[in-house]
Each structure stands twice: as structure tokens, then as C-alpha cells.
Image (cartoon, rainbow, N blue to C red):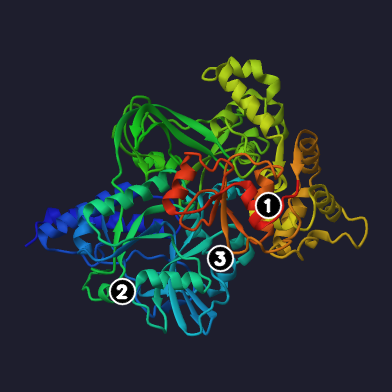
Amino acid sequence: MMDEQKMAQMRAWVAQLNAAADAYYNGRGELMTDFEWDALFDKVKALEAETGVVLPDSPTNKVSADDVVGQKEAHEFAALSLAKTKQVAEVAKWAEGRPIWLSWKLDGLTLVVTYDDGRLTKVVTRGDGHIGTNITHLAAGIQGIPKTVKDKGHLVVRGEAVISYADFEAFLVSSQEDYANPRNLASGSLTLKDVEELKRRNLKWVPFTLVHADQEIVSWGERMDYLDRIGLASVERERVDAPTAESIQAVIDRWTEKVTGRENPFPVDGLVVCYDDTDYAQTGSVTGHHATRAGFAFKWQDETAATTLDHVEWSCAVASISPVAVFAPVELEGTTVKRASLCNISECERLGLGGKGTRLSVIKANKIIPKVVAVTEKIGAFEVPDKCPVCGAPTKVCASESGTKTLKCTNADCPARALAKYERFVSKDGMDIDGLAGETIEKFVNKGWIKSMADIYRLGDHWLEIAGMEGFGEKSANKIRDSIEAARTRGAVQFLVALSIPLCGPDVAKRLLGAYGVKELFAKAAEAAHPVDLFSGGPDVFAGIEGIGPGKSAAFVGWCAEERNLALVRDLLEMVTVTEALVAAAGGTCAGLTFVVTGDVHHFANRDALKAYVESQGGKVAGSVSSKTNFLINNDVASTSGKNKKAKDLGIPIISEDEFVEKFGQASK
């Protein structure tokens, strides 16, 4: 008979895992990190192997379920979970020398999408793998789920609904809501009833397997290619023909570099490994809720480091004042790490955080995000400030519906509430001002030098003071000044995105600017906000533009209804030269092609103008070279840069700007 103490331990561990999984899959506050969950899961597996007992509700014996409210529906094909491993040798042994595929294990929510005779018929959440929730009514708000596809039979496709890091950060800027990570936001988004509100979240569905098609396609790779051909942009993948521990490790190393280099815009928590022979994959047995040959979920070994807490810094953002652990520097994944977000007060309490000298265990979660995963020795007490670190107003601790405690400033006009908007303003998608990270901006806000976005262009007036600040010096001050000067000319799309106008991301900005020039756009919005006659259009003035609609139009007009916002635009336009986007697509010479642009240009006014031209001709512009890139544009064709090297490795043509103009049309200065 099993030892009662071990049985009690198993029950406690299973309860912890299930509670954490429930919070994770349903958009509530994080109860434990992935690192902690995996470690505890492994302990349960080991105890089960030792005792021969598996509890009915053990996570080793069931699929973690989302709990989206709505009409429940049984899956036509069960969505079983994959066995997990962190050992390459285990993957190689499982592969048995047969051709395999590796693809992203995207960190979102699985949706099963069905088409009949080429038309979308239903979208169902994964649920517990056997029964999910029908959310077909939300399909129009999720990118990547077209109403029709080029297939005339019965088609069932499984994919992941994800939100990119960039869209997650942009959402936090324009929203007063608190979400810990993109997956948390994605999960919470499926509880919405308003499709227009869901569109604002930029949730994207990425197919990762073809579950059923009427025609027989045995190769997994060919099945994914088929999805691409019929209009469903499937997950990135790579084939390994003769898998060994060495060849698999080489592929994993390349994909790990993509993660650390942020080449993949979406959060991932590992890689999926599957057989190319789908018939063979179906011959395995089912253990619990895992099909033994369906595939493997490979998760990276997290490198941990021990360090000592110096202090907790309270960082002000749009909606809350967040704790950040500052600790003795450690080396993790090839970089020096000395700070990690603690998310909120609840997380600090869960960890049992103390004061200066507290011993910590830290990782870079999924190779990217520094994370405190454990307190190994608590020293002193964790203190929550009673005054805002920026404006000095009283703070208050607020609890969400799920019980997550966050710290808020009570001053509605606190400058820190605009901090995230300043970060958005200087970001790559915005005015792209290098050297002004959030930490630096926060210091300048605290100095009183930045009270509006336009003040960022006046930082040169404080050059001597910046040069004299601790951690800066003349070199850093010069770099900031030079970056600001370089950013005095930017594209119209960047300008609009930089302003943090609600619902106005890059796609909306492009659509608005495809109809109006910058000054005309704001004049039109101002007139609609303060109509002088019946022909101003009102809040729906831009609703007729394809892809805009009443919600986005009203959000833009509403922003322009505030005189201080229009005053900001006028102030900025006196200091910045905005290059207009090309109006409307003029042709299709780049249709169906994906380009990457790097280096200096001379035919076009700047790289933004070249990118705008590509898009006006039906093409796409990506930020990094991948297997989906058709051309890399670089006037230094012989360069040994990373992008050139990668393009050569993948066999992607590298063309100069002259060659681009010859092939795809004449530039327009």
C-alpha cells in the first residue's frame, strides 16, 4: 500500500499544479512560473513512477483545459496533448531515424477551425481536448481565420491564437488594464463579446497542423504546404531528414538564436517535433491524454543563477506601479542580467520576497525574459511604498477580480502615467530614437525634462546635465542627441503609431494614410470632432475606409477631440519632417513577395519610402530574413552582415536598390 505521507504529498502537488494551470489557461494571475510548473510536474511524474499510483486529476493524466464561457461542443477529433522533454537525446531516440519536422510551440490558446466547401463553419477552443467552447461568433475579430479558403471539402485545422510582443506592449500603452504577458492577454481576449474590441487586441491564429482533409496527404510537410496554398498561413517549420542527437541539436541551436534575437514576433515556450509520415504517427498508443507518436514538445533547459537582491525599484507605467528586482549582476544565456520584473505585489508575496540581501534564483524565461523564480533565503521585509516615486502622491493597493494585487498612483495627472506612451513614441515602430530606453526616459521624466512627447526633441537643451549624470557621460549624451536629430525625419505611419492613438497600430495607420495625407487627416478628424455643419462626418468620418470601421474611426476622432492632443501634433510637426506614405496601392509588381530592407538607400527618400513602395505594389516587408523571404535589398551586396549571411545560407537573392528598381518599378523621391 502506498505510504500515506507520499500520497498526501502527491495530492498537494497535483492540487498546486492544477490551480496554476487553471489560472494560466484562463487569463488569471500567474500562480507559478513555467520553470516552477515544469519542475513540480517532473516531481509528480517521478513519484508516480516510484509508487505506481496516478491520481485521476493528475496533470500527467489529463489535458489542461481553458474555461471559456459559452456553448460547449465535442471535438470531431480529440486534441490530445504532447509528451514533454528537455533532452535532445530523448527526441532522437523517439525519432527512430525517420524524417521529422520542428516548428514553434507557440504560447497562446489552441483553436480548432473547420471549413466546409471552402466556407468557415465553426471555431472551437481546445477545452479539455475532447469538449471545447464554440466561439465562431468571434472569428471576424481574430486575424488569420479567413471566411473562405480554396478547399471544397471538409477541412479541420488546429492552430494557436497568439498576440505578438509588440502588440502586447502597444495594448498596455493604450489600455488601463493589467496583463502579465501576451498569453494572459490572449486568453482574456476570448472572453470578450465585442468583435471590434477583440480586433483591437490583434489576436492572430497560426495553424500548426492539418487534422483532416478529404484528400489524402500523408506527409506532414506537404499538409502544411497545402494549408499555405489554400490561404491559411501556417507555422514556421524545418525538416530534419536523418535525425540524430547531433543534427537535431544543430536545428534547435538555430531556432534558439531566433528566439534570443527576437526574429519570431510571437511568444513561444519551446518547439514541437513531429514525424513527416502522418500514417506512422497515428500508430502509437495513447497513454493518459498523450499519443506516444503524435509528437514531442521540446522545452529549453532554463539556465539558473543565484544572486543577491540589492533593492526593489518601483517602475511607473500606464496602469500601475510595478516592482522590479535589482540584484547583483549574473551571466544568463550569454548576457549580463541585473534586473527582472516582479510583475505585481501578489507575485512578490507568492515568492516570499524580502529586502536587501535576500538570496534569489533567476532565469531568462524561454531564453528572453529575466525572471525571479525563487527566494532561497529571505532577509528583512518586503516594503510597498506609500507614495508615488514620480509625483509623490499617495499610492493605493488595488485587487483585480482574480485577486491580483497591484499598486496604483492616486494622482490622475501623474507624469508617469504617460511613461509607457513615451516609450512607444521612441520605439522602432514609432519615431525609432535609439538610446532612449524606458529606464532612461523614466530618469528624464523624474528630472522634469519630459512633460510631453514633443519635449523628447528638446532634450538637446539638457546636454550638459545629461553628460554629468551618473552612468551617462559625454559619449552617451552625444549618442542621445545624435539619435534625436536623426529622428527628425520619419515616415507618416511611424508618426501616427508614435502618438499612441487608441486602436491606431501600424495597419490602421497605413489604411488612414492611404486615404489622406497627415495634415489633411488631422484636419478632417478635428472637423469631425467639432462639426460646424452636417457634412463633417462625425465620429464615423473614416468608417468607410476599408479595414477601419466605426470603432477605429470613433477612437481616432475622439483622440483629436481633445485640444491638447492636436496641440501636441502641431508642436511635433514644427520639429519633425514627416514623409508622406504613398496613397493607395498603385499596382502589383511586388504582389505575393516578401522583402527585407537593410542598409542605406539612395533612389528612395529613405527606407520607409522604399517599404511603403513595396506595400503599395502588393508586397510585404519583414524585419528579419527567414525562409519566407523572397529578396533581401541591400546596396552593399557583398557585405558580411548577419542578414546577408543568413540570406546566403538560405539561398535568398540579395539585390541592390538599382536591381530592385529595374525589377519592380521606378522610385519616387
User: Which residue shows up at 14% across the image and 54% down it?
Assistant: 6
**Label 2 element class:** helix
Q: In this view, does 568 lie to the left or right of 151?
A: right
Of labels 2 and 3, earlier in sequence is 3
Separation of disc 2 and disc 3 at Cα? Answer: 29 Å
Q: Residue 142 carries which label?
A: 3
Foreground tag (1 vs 3):
1
Mark 1 and mark 3 lie on one chain; the one further toward the N terminus is 3
In this view, the mark in front (2 or 3): 2
Q: Could you tell me residue 36's position as x and y percent?
A: 30, 47
Q: Which of 200 and 117 is in front in this view?
A: 117
Q: For mark 2, does the 10 Å Cα neighbourhood hold few (<14), some (14 to 19), or many (20 or more) residues?
A: some
Q: Name the residue under label 2.
A: 278
Q: Please tell me which of labels 1 and 2 falls first in the chain.
A: 2
Q: What residue type is labelled 3?
A: Ile
**Quadrant of the rendered structure where residue 142 is?**
bottom right
Residue 190 horizontal side relative to residue 540, left or right: left
CA gap between label 1 and label 3 equals 25 Å
Q: Nearer the viewer, residue 75 or 366?
A: 366
Q: Distance between the residues labelled 1 and 2?
A: 42 Å
Q: Mark 1 points at which residue?
A: 612
Tag 1: amino acid: Ala
Residue 152 screen position, x and y as percent: 51, 84
Q: Where is residue 260 in the image (x, y as percent from the top left)?
A: 41, 43
Do the residues bearing badges 1 and 3 touch, measured as CB atoms within 8 Å?
no
Q: Pointer 3: residues within 10 angstroms few (<14), some, or many (20+)?
A: many
User: How many labels, in total?
Assistant: 3
